[in-house]
Amino acid sequence: MDLKDIKAIVDLMKKNSITEFELEKQEFKIRLKRGGIAGSNLNYVDDNGLITAQASLAQSLPPLVLPASPHNGDLEIKSPMIGTFYRAPSPESANYAEIGSEVNPESVVCIIEAMKVMNEIKAELRGVVTQILVEGGKPVEFGQPLFKIRPF
């Protein structure tokens, strides 16, 4: 089973409001469980036992935008998945966002590579980038703040 198959299953789960899915084929077993606000829990099971990894697909979950600190009004764009953070589409290209850049809900602010798939992360709000909290090429965790945005 490859990532495309897993994405198709996740899409079917969303469309049909299914919260749990389990598939077993020969020596392969996968159990998917959608839950919580933060995203989907993907549980991979092999013959040695249960291995759990928190993951999310960019198509199925937008970045989390939560209030940062109450005194300045900035909001945070948080990583919706575990992966490698990139500020530009390629090493030769300009960065998607810089400090002072205006963004709107459809503005791509970075890419997170997960399992060799490049996932574009959108701002999901309108405002100005006030801080970039992660260096390009560095690993990020699920829920880790990536940017601070001052909303309009």
Image: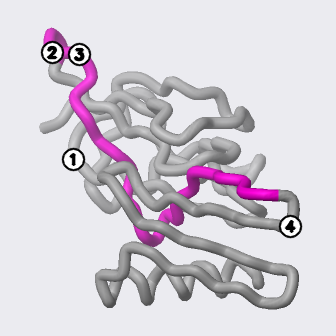
Q: Which mark is residue 69?
A: 3
- Residue linked to disc 1: 126
* Alpha carbons under labels 3 and 1: distance apart: 18 Å
Alpha-carbon span between mark 3 and mark 4: 46 Å
Amino acid, disc 1: Arg
Residue picked out by circle 2: 70
SS at circle 1: loop
For label 2, the crowd category at 10 Å Cα-Cα, with few meaning under 14, some 14 to 19 and many 20 or more, is few
Secondary structure category for the residue under label 3: loop
Asked whether 52 or 55 is in front, the reply is 52
Which is closer to the viewer, label 3 or label 4? 4
Mark 2 and mark 1 in contact (Cβ < 8 Å)?
no
Q: How is the image coloured?
A: one colour
Q: Which residues are magenta?
A: 49-72
Q: State the CA–CA distance, disc 2 to disc 3.
A: 4 Å
Q: Earlier in the sequence, mark 4 or mark 2?
A: 4
Q: How many marks?
A: 4
Q: Earlier in the sequence, mark 3 or mark 4?
A: 4
Which residue is at a point 70% across and 64% down the rendered structure image?
A: 44
Residue 50 placed where, x, y %? 72, 57
Is the Cβ of the residue at disc 4 closer than 8 Å to that at disc 2?
Answer: no
Q: Residue at x 31, y 47 (%)?
A: 103
Look at the numbered disc 4 and give the secondary structure of its residue.
loop
Q: Nearer the viewer, mark 1 or mark 4?
A: 4
Q: Nearer the viewer, residue 83 or 9?
A: 9
Sequence-wise, the earlier of marks 1 and 4 is 4
